[in-house]
């Protein structure tokens, strides 16, 4: 059964929205009729995403190339959405970059990259978006990762930033509940373009990973991850905040 949403009155920001899970979510929101600002640092990917999304013939698409690691750029993101759309209902902090290294080899620069592209922009954008989300009684969707929850080897910088985002999100969820702003997280496993490329290069490793997932498949960025994002941004989840949703085929069970 396919669940449909009418988001024609919703105004959405998605960072890292030109590819992967971000583009999958953007597709889901645009199909639901939302006005979506896609933020990314990749010019070519933004142009391709804009072309594909406008071809859907629904919603409204804006793109913005910027580096979210700079706080002034984050203010520009919020200002662009509010000016062009007349307000903000949903902030999705999806963008994040990191290096994979053994823990003993981790450097200050590795941690800085992960925190400057993941944790700090999430914090800044949430603070900057707060008055607009308060006005709309909106919601924030942040991203966690099994790398942090399970402590995946070689992912220390990424895991540390993702778990910091989880802590930040829970505090904001408690503080902002009085303003009817909900803050939740998605921890996904998805079949992105990068994963598909890895599948071609290492089919045995890919098959082994899929086999350990109880549902024996990776999630679709639009139909699985995007669908949960739509739910969390909708009135159907109006009594849910401060939660981490494991959209990973059953790979990790939170206790």
Image (spheres, helix red, strand yellow):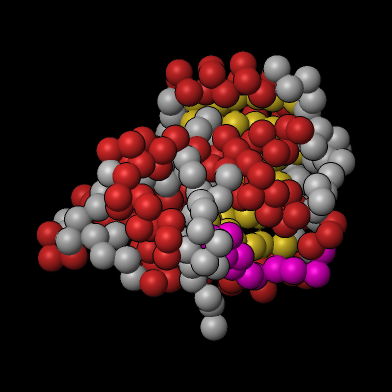
Percent across and percent down for residue 181 are 74, 60
- The residue at the far bottom in this view is 255
Percent across and percent down for residue 119 are 44, 55
Is 110 situated left or right of 119 in this image? Answer: left
Is 92 situated left or right of 193 in this image? Answer: right
**Image quadrant in which the C terminus is located:** bottom right
Residue at horizontal 85 percent and vertical 57 percent from the top: 235
Residue at horizontal 49 percent and vertical 71 percent from the top: 252
Residue 5 lies in quadrant: top right
Percent across and percent down for residue 149 are 43, 71
In this orientation, does residue 82 appear? no
In this rendered view, identify the residue nearer to me: 158 or 70: 158
In this rendered view, identify the residue nearer to me: 47 or 80: 47
In this rendered view, identify the residue nearer to me: 170 or 239: 239
Secondary structure mostly seen in the magenta stretch: loop
Percent across and percent down for residue 124 are 52, 50
Residue 210 lies in quadrant: bottom left
User: Per the image, is 252 magenta?
Assistant: no
Residue 75 lies in quadrant: top right
Question: Total of numbered circles in the picture?
Answer: 0
Residue at horizontal 61 percent and vertical 65 percent from the top: 245
Which span is picked out in magenta?
238-248
In this orientation, does residue 58 appear? yes
User: Per the image, is 240 magenta?
Assistant: yes
Residue at horizontal 53 percent and vertical 77 percent from the top: 254
Is 216 situated left or right of 116 in this image? Answer: right
């Amino acid at each position: 059964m396919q669940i449909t949403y009418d988001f024609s009155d919703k105004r959405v920001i998605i960072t890292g929205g030109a590819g992967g899970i971000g583009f999958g979510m953007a597709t889901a929101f645009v199909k639901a009729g939302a006005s979506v600002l896609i933020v990314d640092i990749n010019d070519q990917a933004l142009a391709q995403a804009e072309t594909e999304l406008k071809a859907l013939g629904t919603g409204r698409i804006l793109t913005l190339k910027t580096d979210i690691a700079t706080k002034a750029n984050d203010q520009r993101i919020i200002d662009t959405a509010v000016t062009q759309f007349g307000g903000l209902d949903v902030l999705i902090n999806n963008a994040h970059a990191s290096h994979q290294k053994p823990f003993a080899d981790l450097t200050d620069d590795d941690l800085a990259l992960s925190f400057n592209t993941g944790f700090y922009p999430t914090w800044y954008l949430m603070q900057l978006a707060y008055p607009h989300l308060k006005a709309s009684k909106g919601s924030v969707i942040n991203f966690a990762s099994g790398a942090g929850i399970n402590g995946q080897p070689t992912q220390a910088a990424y895991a540390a930033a993702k778990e910091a985002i989880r802590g930040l999100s829970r505090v904001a969820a408690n503080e902002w509940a009085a303003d009817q702003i909900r803050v939740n997280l998605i921890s996904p496993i998805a079949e992105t373009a990068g994963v598909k490329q890895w599948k071609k290069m290492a089919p045995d490793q890919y098959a082994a990973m899929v086999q350990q997932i109880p549902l024996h498949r990776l999630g679709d960025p639009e139909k699985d991850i995007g669908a949960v994002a739509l739910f969390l941004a909708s009135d159907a989840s109006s009594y849910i905040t401060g939660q981490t949703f494991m959209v990973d085929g059953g790979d990790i069970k939170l206790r």
